[in-house]
Image (tube, rainbow, N blue to C red):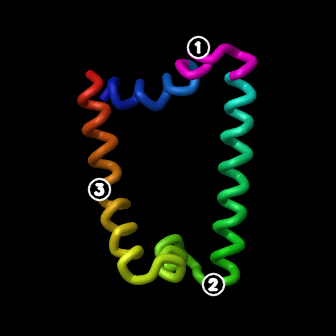
Amino acid sequence: VLGVFGCFVSGIPYAFNLSGVGLGVILLALVAIVTDYSLVLMLRSAHISGSFSYQSLMKSAFGKYGFVVLSFLQFIYPFIGKYQAIKKN
């Protein structure tokens, strides 16, 4: 359990340690701006398509097969993360 907890908690300080404080703050701000912009785009797309959930937005954007792939990836993602956390230790 500590290994899984340590992966998420120590990620940002480790990145700051590798990049330095100045570049680390710049990169953190850049990631925050890109994330915010992508969320705004996703919300606007949902409003235009009349979608009320992430799954229905992906279905309207990528069709039936995209929806199936998305559902599979959302199901399998926690298992991949857990495998990577165990593999590190």
Range of residues picked out in magenta? 14-23
Q: CA distance from mark 2 to mark 3?
A: 27 Å
Asked if the residue at tag 2 contacts the one at tag 1, i.e. Cβ–Cβ closer than 8 Å, the answer is no
In the picture, which quadrant includes the N terminus? top left
Q: Residue at x 69, y 79 (%)?
A: 47
Disc number placed over residue 76 in the picture, else none: 3
- Where 1 sits versus 65, above or below? above
Magenta stretch holds residue 58: no
Picture coordinates of residue 86 (x, y %)?
A: 25, 30
Magenta stretch holds residue 15: yes
Which of the 4 image quarters holds residue 64? bottom left
Q: CA distance from mark 1 to mark 2?
A: 43 Å
Identify residue for label 1: 17
Picture coordinates of residue 87 (x, y %)?
A: 24, 29
Residue 82 or 28: which is nearer the viewer? Answer: 28
SS at circle 2? helix
- Where 80 sits versus 58, above or below? above
SS at circle 3? helix
